[in-house]
Image: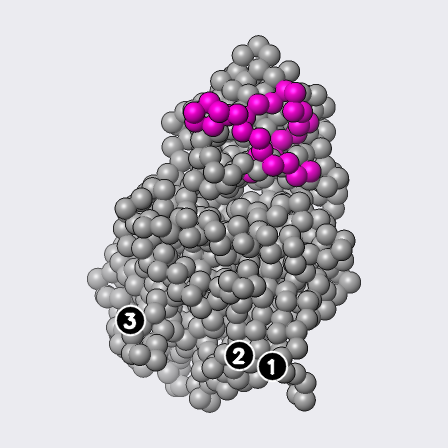
Amino acid sequence: MESYFREPQVEEGKRNIILQNRCGNRLTLLCHDDHCAFEFDYKPNAYRRKDYRARNFSNRDNNTQFFKQFTFPDIHTDDIQGFDYDPFHTVLHSKNEASAQNEIHLINLAQHNAFVISARCPLLIGIKPQHSFVVSNGLLSETFGDRGERIHSFIAFTNFEENRYRVLDDGTHVLQLMENDILLVGAEETEYLAQVCIDTFANKTLNEINELNEADLHRDLRHGLQRFNDPDWQRIFDVNQRVVWSGLDQGGACFGALNRIYHLIWVRDGSMTASHFALAGNTDSIKIWAPFLLANPSKTLQDDGSYREEFLQIVGSRWTKAEDDGLFYTCWSMFTYFRCTGDDQLIHGEALPLLLRCAQAQLEKCWEQDRGLMGSDTLGEDVLAGSIYYGYDIVNGKIAKSHHHKENEKQIERCYSLYHQVNTFNVLSMLRILLAQRPDLDDGLSEQFAVICQHIQQSLRSIFCDKNQQLYSMYVRYDDGSDEWVPFGYGCDYWEHAWAVSQGPFFPVPDLQLQSARLIIDTWGNYKPYGYCPWNVLARSLSEYGLDKDAYADLFTDEIKEALHCPEKYPMAGALTEYYGATESWRALPFSAGSFINSTASQLLQSQAQGLAVRGGCAISNIENFQYRLARIHVNSSGDQNVVANYTLNDQDIRFSLQLPENLLRTGTNTIQLERGSAPQHPRLHGSNAELIMYNELEKSATLQLSSAIDMELCVENYDTERMTFNDANNQSIAPQITEMPDTPYTMLSISGHPQVKVEIRI
């Protein structure tokens, strides 16, 4: 490092390819004018080391490399003719001024701390160790230390003669490859572990190694497979499913992106990635992310000498910005883990008591009873003038002006954002459902949380929306005592506002949130380029309420086109970008990929707050092996309209509910046959925030039993008071509160105070 505070690093090459294996080690190809260099970053092995320090060892501000130098001296930027990018097997095509052509393969070994380099024609490689190599025929190795870690790097090659090994005067070790020679490059914790890796791939050809690697990947990427009608959409799904799996290491850490500048572990980014993937039918990510996250809260030293456990911006470190959304994303990860897998181990361990303590501490800090709102000294990723940390970048301790600091102008002292209100409503709702599994922990908390949720709903309807029924983005109080209501637009946090109206899983004011989501889609481009992650979430939310199939597809036109574009800086075609129009910026962002894949999966199988619902979207034709608890669901569709005309679950007609009945889902294989067309004229349950625990259909009616530890919201198509009745557990009639969802055929029915509700629907 050349200064006390290292700024976030960006790859220096004119062209850069970034690969990361499941153990957390990272390879970056940096193409310069006069040579190409490899940069290998080391993390302690993710299989054996589950602690936070191991996962965050080489972050964007402080990293360790296997070698001091690793170059292709004969390959220059202008020689590269093309990149066949894949997160686990990328191929470089080169042709120099002498018309010498080459094909260079880079295999990212998913389950090993190593990478494979191979070339069809002669390829010169120069390597410098950190200190000095131990040299033997077919192996260069070095053991060195950094920040308390012992690291054993290795380069396994064929032998001295066939690879023309020699050492230059400046200490550079030279190897040459040709005719598909295999170079195995990696770093382990011990010489023994390195040798195990070397022995695994000894004497294997490039094709054999690739087949072994793909077999490993198939085992983990066989769930939630989507089949698209458009080959471009299929390409995006296939590449980004692999991108996410490479970005999530085996120890559970998920990085914001593979790029250096993002190589920290964000609570929000990892939670979005793993949760969206789980909701799209692949729970492998959430199974390792949620336990890792919950085991690594930040511990903030208080004035009285005690430590407070919190979930803020960055996982596990007190060097983290005080983002108030960290608690929501942590609760969402745990809730999604339980909801999608059915596994209650986190609920019965230390995780739920920890979240309850964190929630109570945040309410104590932020809940203002007189306003009926949550207030904060944080907005977006920056603290406000009301915080003692104002003027610092807490991630690295550097003194730096806040993004909200304005010279000679009043400063925002406290903020009451829509995002914070909706997140809090969701946190308390999710915790109430989890507490229903652990009543021994309740002690009146559920009732307390329910009261606050009701206050938030009332405040959002009474003071947080304008005369056009659009939700404000935030209410702010300035340091001079003045205040202001800020609508969506200039001055707000666009991403957070978009998530507030569309993310869920619970929606305190669904009609107002729907109206506001439509406004964002229509106007965001007037203010600044939109981010694809919240854009994908908005598209999913709007499609839930009848967005036309062509309008839905149009929302993704630019995202698909830009992802397939092969840019100069990061020629990783197929990997999703972060912002509209920023094709030369970051690539391979797991949170963009997660929201995209959940949005497209929802076109046939929409994850509800506590269940699944069939949908008639036309973007995809099939879903294979969708994971939901003990069920594996295959969805096949036909027809070209945007509405479910009818469907069968395991050959049984389900005419009165698009939400899947839990009692009809089998352990193991389930098949849904879906036909698009005209909607039936009788009432039909479109979805709900409750569990549909029982469904029984007769010739002209059906009985539905719903269950929830919180107030129920039932979305009904073609609602008719004459054809629907509602009763509680004692068979007493219930009159739901009715809210029409604007410009849709749907009615939202709210039922309070009844954990069990029986609904009868008649033709």
* The stretch drawn in magenta includes residue 646: no
Q: Which residue is drawn at 67% across and 34% down?
A: 746
Disc sitting over residue 479 in the figure: 1
Q: Hey, what amino acid is under mark 1?
A: Asp
Which quadrant does the C terminus fall into?
top right
Dot 3 corresponds to which residue?
Answer: 151
Taking the spot 60% from the left edge, 44% from the top edge, the residue there is 599
Q: Which amino acid does label 3 sit on?
A: Ile
Label 2 crowding class (10 Å Cα cut-off): few <14, some 14-19, many 20+? some
Q: Spatial distance from mark 3 to mark 2, Cα to Cα? A: 45 Å
Residue 542: percent from the left, percent from the top?
A: 67, 44
Residue farthest along the top direction in this orientation: 699
- On screen, residue 266 versus residue 641, left or right, reads left
**The N terminus sits in image quarter:** bottom left
User: On the image, numbered disc 2 is attached to which residue?
Assistant: 386
Q: If you read the primary sequence from the N terminus, does the residue marked by circle 1 or circle 3 appear first? A: 3
Residue 715 place in picture, x, y as percent: 61, 34
Q: What stretch is highlighted in magenta?
A: 713-740
Q: Tag 1, which secondary structure?
A: loop
| 723 within the magenta span | yes
